[in-house]
Structures are given as C-alpha cells and as structure tokens.
Amino acid sequence: MSEREQPRRETVTLIDNATGRRVELPVRRGTHGPAVIEIGRLYKELGYFTYDPGFLSTASCRSAITFIDGERGVLLYRGYPIEQLAEHSTFLEVAYLLLYGELPDREQLRRFEDTITHHTMINESLKSFYQGFYHDAHPMAIMVGVVGSLSAFYHDSTDIRNPRHREVAAHRLIAKMPTIAAASYKHSVGEPIVYPRNDLSYVGNLLRMMFAVPTEDYVVHPVAERALDLIFILHADHEQNASTSTVRLAGSSAANPFACVASGIAALWGPAHGGANEAVLRMLAEIGNVRNIPKYIAKAKDKNDPFRLMGFGHRVYKNYDPRARIIRRMCHEVLRELGDDNDPLFELALRLEEEALRDEYFIERHLYPNVDFYSGLIYRAIGIPTNMFTVMFSIARTAGWVAQWMEMIADPEQRIGRPRQLYDGPPRRDYVPLEQREPARAAGGVHFQGEARVTD
Ligand code: SDX
C-alpha cells in the first residue's frame, strides 16, 4: 500500500494544563464498538497514570471472540448473533466456534464432540478429594479446589508455550467440568459418584451423572436436555467480565490453565457476578408474594439498604440483556413441558420485572433483567438445587474462559498484567521503637482490639 494510501494515523492529544506539556496518543479502531486510545506512553511522556476503578472505560486487551453492544442489547460470538446460535446451534458447536473462530463442518464437529466425550472421565484418585469436604460444603468451594488440583494430574498439558498442550488442556477442562460438577452434587447428597457415558450428549451426560442412582435406570428428559444445552450456549462467553478478566490475569503470569480456570470459578462465585442466579431464587423466595413486591423495590432503591434486586442491572447492558430475553421465553416452554407452568416463583419474577421496569429509579439507571434473573427458574424446573446454579454457570463459561486464555497466550501484545495505583496512604515516615509509641487510642482509624478465643 503506497504512502498516500496508508490509512490516516488517528490520534488524540492530551494537554497538561498545569505544565502545557502535551502528548499525542494513537487511536485504534476495531470491527465493532468504541475505538481505543493507546495510553501505554502516557506515564513516560506526561508522568500520569490513568485511574478507572472497575474499568468502566478501560479495555484490558483486544479480542476477536465476543462482542457486546450494551446500548442495543447485542451479543455476538465470533460475529454470530446469540439469538441465531440459541436457535440453531448446540453448546459443543458454540464451544468449537469460541475456540477456533469458525463454525465447524460436519467432520470437524464430529471429531470435536468425540474428543470432548473421551476426556470426560477424571482421575480415579480425585474421588478421594471429595471425601475431604463436609457433605454441606458449597459445591462452588469444591469446584475451586478440584479444578485447581487438575494440574497435579496433567503434567503432559501444562507447557503453555506449546499450542498442542494448550489445546489438550482446553479440551480436558471443557470435558471434565460436568463430571467434576456432578460429583460435587453427588457428594452433597451422599450418593455414589456416577461415571460419564460415551453414548450420551454433553448435557445428557451431566444430567445423568447428577441424577442417576445405582438402583434404577435413568432416562434423560429431552426437554431438560435441550433447555440446559441452550442455557449453556447463552452463558458460554461474555467479553472481559470479572471472571474472564481473572482468568486472563492469572494466565498472564504463565500459570497453568487449570489454576487459571480455578481462579475464574472463584471470581464467578460472587453474588455480583455468577452467584447472582442463586441469589435471585433466594430473593424470590424471600419476597414470597406479589403483595411484597413494592416493599422490596423500595428496599432496592434505598441507598441505606444494602439490598439489591438480584438479576437486575449490568455493567455493559443498558438495555435488555438479550440472553435474559431468550431465557424468559424459554421459561414458559420448559415450565409448561416439565409440568410447572404455574410455578408461583415464575409468576412472581414476571410481576417483579413488570413493576421494576415501570419504576423511574430503574428506568433512569437502565436497570433491566440480566442473564441471571430467569435462569434459576429453569434450573429449578429441571431439578437442579439452588446451590448448584453457579456451578452450572461455571461449566458453560469454561468454554469462554479457555478460549479467552488461548487467545491471550497467543497474543504478541500481551504481557504480565500489572496495574498501577493512586497511592493515598501515609507519607514517608521513620520507624518508632515500641517503648516510644503512644498507647493506641480507639478514636480515629481502625485499631486491633484483640478478640475472644475462637474455637473451631
Ligand atoms: C453477570 O460482566 C458481565 O458480563 C457479567 C455477566 C457475564 O455473563 O459474565 O453478564 C454475568 O454477572 C450478570 C450480573 C449479575 N449480578 C446481579 O444481578 C447482581 C445485581 N446487580 C448489581 O449488583 C449491578 O447491577 C452489577 C454488579 C451487575 C453492575 O454494577 P455496576 O455496573 O458497577 O453498576 P453500579 O453498581 O454502579 O450501579 C449503578 C447504579 C447505582 O445507583 P446510583 O449510585 O447511580 O444511585 O444502579 C444501581 C446502583 O445502586 N443499581 C442497582 C442494581 N444494580 C445497580 N440498584 C438496585 N438493584 C440492582 N440490581
């Protein structure tokens, strides 16, 4: 391309009004969405850091995997609209798309499904790991521990500089999450762990490993199988959300992929993130009746009340979360098919949404139902207990986590993530020997008051 045809180099100029110094920073445009200002030289040339807690306006990386238009409620996986994938695809086909960037042909899909199927077993000695947990351990606590321990078994796929190792580790993680999740559930109900079967679908295997018992045959319900597969498609990836960013940051230090995904599971567990689906069901049960909706909406609006409407609001979507719209529609079908079509909690959820979306507080803050608002109702209709809802989310999101991790490792621009800070602690001061220190007074600041002996 001749000099004349070179695309015009876009820049922005930042001027320090205190000193008059200025720096010209390059602008980079992507396929969709806002352009970015490359600020890497800012500190060196102008002596400033940027400050953006929560990363409201900060891109941490470039990615070709998922795109969200929050204003228009658009979600694309590798350019394909989520609505079309939800209608026509399967979770494993979507996992392939996220990992490899294109929809597979028939043979590629068959081979990928076969590969995943033949990685579903876990090392037999992992079963004793579960015995170390109380029966009432939260399944997400078990997931963090067991997934993190996988690297102890797979030394043959932890050389992250080896593309083949990265691919095998990705396949193993996608394949083993349902087996590990189902075993977590079985431990919590005191039933024997069920082995995967190679003649079942990805989701059919999960349902059978969760609900089959040695005393009778288990038949996978096709409506539950399709509903769960669809929910997994909707949860598979979502740009640089908190858990994906955690996986990327852990991966930037060259940690092994099993440890990185374990860190993602830990981040997902928070009720502000993936833990919201479990929190929504608990919130609906607490509201209990449509008559109580105004009281809880008032609580959600009250700045002095920590209560928030779980399943509502989103950092990026300032419109209806397209996934919530699909799940809401699916709720009707699944509840009707599974015989719960007059589920009082579903009716309550619909009325709560209706009331909230009429309220100025929610309207002016663009607070709409997000993916977690309705998903728990479907999990419940399928028979999945509330404390397993976020575990379901983690199974699906593993496809996105490993795809994003592989993209990051292969990106020549990526280096260890090491954010800077604005320091507002004490100025430099000299050490004071113990005998010269004033008695610590309770007034002002937080002082250690000592605590009563705590027995386990
Ligand atoms: C997921 O990032 C992703 O993509 C996540 C996810 C994914 O697929 O990975 O989509 C999955 O995590 C969905 C979100 C699930 N979490 C919840 O449903 C928990 C309830 N929602 C909120 O906690 C909140 O909306 C967040 C955490 C989702 C977003 O928080 P933000 O972007 O930091 O927004 P904010 O807390 O600054 O809220 C802006 C305003 C505030 O009021 P003001 O200070 O402006 O007066 O909206 C209010 C908030 O108080 N607000 C809510 C509210 N959510 C925001 N008020 C009541 N109820 C809520 N749910």
Image (tube, helix red, strand yellow):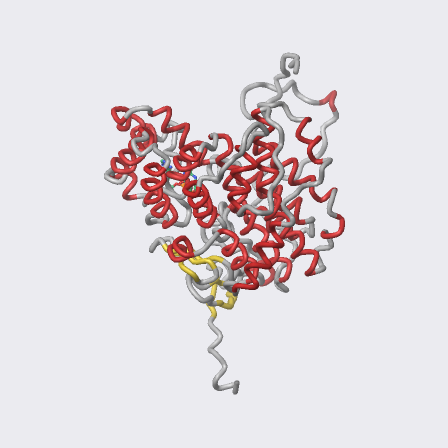
Residue 52 visible from this viewpoint: no
Q: Give the x, y percent position of residue 402.
A: 59, 52
Give 288 or 29, whichever is nearer the viewer.
288
In the image, 15 versus 367, the foreground residue is 367
From the viewer's perspective, is 357 left or right of 98? left
Q: Image quadrant of ligand 1?
A: top left
Residue drawn at x 65%, y 48% as measured from the top left? 119
> Residue 188 in the image: x percent, y percent?
57, 26
Residue farthest to the left, as pictured: 358
Quadrant where the image shows the C terminus: top right
The residue located at (45%, 39%) in the rendering is 221
| Nearer to me, 260 or 106 | 106
Vertical position of residue 27 compared to residue 210: above or below: below
* Location of residue 67 (image quadrant): bottom left
Placement of 82 over or under 229, stated as above or below: below
User: Horizontal placement of 102 versus 161: left or right?
Assistant: left
Viewer-nearest residue: 196 or 419: 196
Q: How many marks?
A: 0
Residue at 62% x, 59% y: name it.
Answer: 414
Which percent across, then down, holds residue 103?
50, 63
Residue 268 visible in the shown view: yes
Q: Position of residue 84 (x, y in %)?
A: 39, 58
